[in-house]
Image: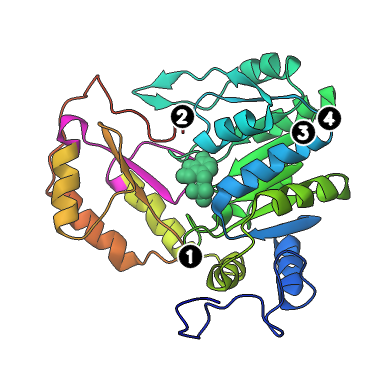
Amino acid sequence: MPGHKRGGEDITELSYSDCLLSPTGPILMAERDIAKILNARRSFILTDGSTCGIFSMLYALKREGMTSVAFPVSSHRSVYNACRVLGLRAVLIPQKTERGIPLRPEIEDIEAALKGADALLLTSPDYYGFLAPMSAAREICRTHAKPFLIDGAHGGHLHFSDMHASNYADMWVDGVHKSLPALTQGAVVSCRTEEWAAALEEGVKTFRTTSPSYPIMASVEEAVKWPRNEEIERAAAQFKEDFGAVPNDDWTKILIFFGEEADNAQRTLEAQNVYPEFNDGNYLLFYLSPCTTEEDLARLGELLRSLPRGRRVTEGKIPIYSEGT
Ligand SMILES: Cc1ncc(COP(=O)(O)O)c(C=O)c1O
């Protein structure tokens, strides 16, 4: 194996290649480096996306005897699915929407939900680039002695800053294939202290593939070690101002209102090989990373200047992050 017999980097476990399921060589060294960079006690490389990390964290809760978890309604479907598969009761935290965009959950709503649940899971940042109220949530979890989990599927690039999940959560996921340059499906799940290490490891070993991709593994290590690109961070902030983007917390996500012109704008951009991350019926979201260049941004700006903006569409599209399988 693999059956393509082409050799190269896409190998399986060989005498020299170490083994992700019980690493002792270069993969162990990579996981240790990653844990150090992410300020974690243990980090596990995932080749099955943040989805696997979410299942693993919720498995860890279940293994420690917990039966319910509170999370905001707009959480990713993997959170709902993991609860269903693991038999965890979901305690939903309501979220208001403004202009069709789900707002960050209110701290009072988080606290109320947590009273009826054994643990808390928040997404930070979310798909629209808003951070969860992590500091306040951490304090509430401490007060109630309940674990705090963060879905950072969109936050891998924040590990140089105090906005990163590691500063707040007991366990968290970094989706390094979204906002850092890992291959698709590359992610990391981590825990801050030894307390959760064994349960999380058992979760990872339960849900991950037994044939992990070596190119993805290598790309995860490279992505976590990728240097911060402050030039593009500054350029993104300026771009948001110049184009009237919705103010948010995350430089990688540029949200521009097009209203009823959203579909036309998407079509025009795609004809020029520029693909927005999503179109929710009113807004297009452009997703940057440290690999975005200033030339990329300048080109996007040029195209945006020629695109009309329309009136608000009241019937938005079904949000892509929402509940369901
Ligand atoms: C908020 C959030 N969490 C988790 C996931 C799952 O990540 P992955 O596709 O890497 O499994 C996604 C994917 O889009 C997401 O948006």
Please identify the quarter of the rendering in which residue 225 is found. bottom right
Label 4, label 2: how many angstroms apart (C-alpha)? 26 Å
What residue did someone put label 1 on?
Answer: 183
What residue did someone put label 4 on?
Answer: 65
Tell me whether the residue at label 3 lies in contact with that at label 2, contact meaning CB atoms closer than 8 angstroms.
no
Q: Secondary structure at mark 1?
A: loop
Residue at 73% of width from left, 34% of height from top?
148
Q: Disc 1 beta carbon < 8 A from ligand 1? A: no
Residue type pointed to by label 3: Lys
Q: Secondary structure at mark 4?
A: loop
Tell me whether the residue at label 1 lies in contact with that at label 4, contact meaning CB atoms closer than 8 angstroms.
no
Instruction: Pick whichever of labels 1 and 4 is earlier in the sequence.
Output: 4
Tell me whether the residue at label 3 lies in contact with that at label 4, contact meaning CB atoms closer than 8 angstroms.
yes
Residue 62 tag number: 3
Instruction: Pick whichever of labels 4 and 2 is earlier in the sequence.
Output: 4
Q: Is residue 12 magenta-colored?
A: no
Residue type pointed to by label 1: Leu
- Name the mark nearer the viewer: 1 or 4: 4
What residue did someone put label 2 on?
Answer: 324
